[in-house]
Amino acid sequence: MSKKSKIIKTIVFMILLICSFLVVQRLFRVGEISHAAMHKSFYEEKDESLDAVYMGSSVTYSFWNPLLCWEQTGYTVFSYSVSLMPVEAYKTILQDIRSSQPDALYIIALNPFEKEDLSYKAVHFLVDYYPDIPKKLQFIHDITSLMPGSAFDKLEYYFPLIRFHSHLDDVNEVFLTEDYPDYKGSKNFGYYLMGAVDNSPITEVVKTETPIKEDRAAILTDFLDYCKTENLNVLFVVSPQPAAPVEEQEEFNWIAAQAEAAGFPVINLQNAVEDMQLDMTADYFDRVHSNIHGSIKFTSMLSDYLKEHYNFTDKRGTSEGASWEESYQSYLPLITPYTLDFERDFSKRDNTLASPEIVRVVDLTNGVRIEWEPVSGAENYHLYRKIDEGNWERIADLSSSTYSYTDTTMNKKHNNTYLVVASRMENGQRIYGNSDYTGFAVTPPQR
């Protein structure tokens, strides 16, 4: 074999080895498919096309739903958020966002300043799915330069397989496709759609303040100085976590006060639970993250704020908004089975009307009888039914003196789930109360 042939074969072998290494590396990445979808979707947006970018951690993407904002306003407000997004990297991330969306409003989540940190997993969530290879290398360099550790420790962000064996438990999925859904950062994972925990009772609104740790405060000050020096159009937001320990809530208030003192607009929704009509028994899937029902309420309130304070253009029905409308139409069927017919119209809600509790379901020859407890203030009751994992369907509108209903049309071969919602009239419009959303499940009667 000639020397030239050996060189060619060696080069071909090295190319194949590198390609194989990169393929395996892409398959085994720390994170979730939603992180991959968010990155792909954001970097496919046209330059200078977004009204706003909402940046933050999992609290951000559980509360803010871009496509529900689109439905309500026609605004393009992308959710650039991943789990554990470290505030140490906020400046680097925002610089990158600004490179493609220089004229956008930057909505910044303040909650993570309280305790998030720059862990290896948080960095992987940010960089593993970054699509542009030349920029990705710079992005990794900028973020890892903020981290402690040796140069070898940081190599895993460039080549995850170097330490992959020690992080095997953190790999949630093996990704065999790059065909991710384009939901503009809106989420559709199970807990978000179906999870619910009872975070009550919330006894009082916490209005006092407690300073955060000095190192966290220094990061906050540096970021505020950066935003001020760059003269950025920024809106800071605290998402509501009224079930958090009092000290954490006091720290959220202190963080918000620092941003406000620096001259920036701040919305501290920690103190707006009642105005937002959040139901602490049904609108969260854990102590800090909202589910789809809480997200609807949060998104509606913040969308109204944007409409009142910013001159964004409604892009519904325009060529500029075509991709957002397409994404919305694809997304809507995913959330419809988990929401009620009136729920996304915030003007039709009344948090003071309690959720009627179904207390008994009686098996009858011709169907089942559903019985519930009356609630104060109800003028009517509305019974909903879901068959298996289908959509909620309203099957009866009943008077305030009716506390039971016989369903003779239930599908006896499938599971049937029921829930009841109370309503009243106000200024000629029907206003609906709370619901537990999970419903009362009934298996088919056995004959």
Image: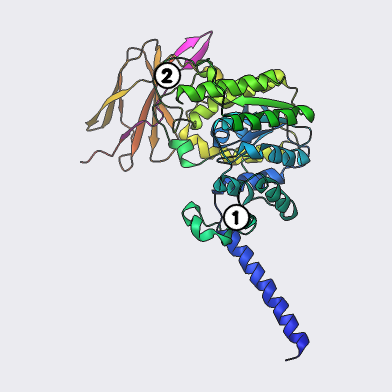
Residue 172 seen in this snapshot: no
Question: Which span is picked out in magenta?
Answer: 424-441
Look at 72% across and 36% down and name the residue there. 321
Q: Position of residue 258 (x, y in %)?
A: 65, 21
**Residue 426 sits inside the magenta stretch:** yes
In the image, farthest residue toward the bottom: 1
- Between marks 2 and 1 in the image, the one whose residue lies nearer the viewer: 1
Q: 341 or 130, which is in the foreground?
A: 130
Q: Position of residue 34 (x, y in %)?
A: 56, 45
Task: Classify the position of the C terminus by image quarter.
Answer: top left
Q: Position of residue 352 (x, y in %)?
A: 44, 13
- SS state under label 2: loop
List the residue tagged with mark 1. 153
Q: Is residue 330 above or below residue 370?
A: below
Q: 189 or 97, which is in the foreground?
A: 97
Residue 221 seen in this snapshot: yes
Amino acid type indicated by mark 2? Ile
Task: Classify the position of the N terminus by image quarter.
Answer: bottom right
Q: 124 or 261, which is in the foreground?
A: 261
List the residue tagged with mark 2. 202
Q: Mark 2 or mark 1: name the one nearer the start of the chain.
A: 1
Look at 60% across and 39% down and name the residue there. 86
Q: Position of residue 44 (x, y in %)?
A: 71, 46
CA neighbours of label 2 inside 10 A, class few (<14), some (14 to 19), many (20+): few
Asked which colour scheme the image uses, the reply is: rainbow
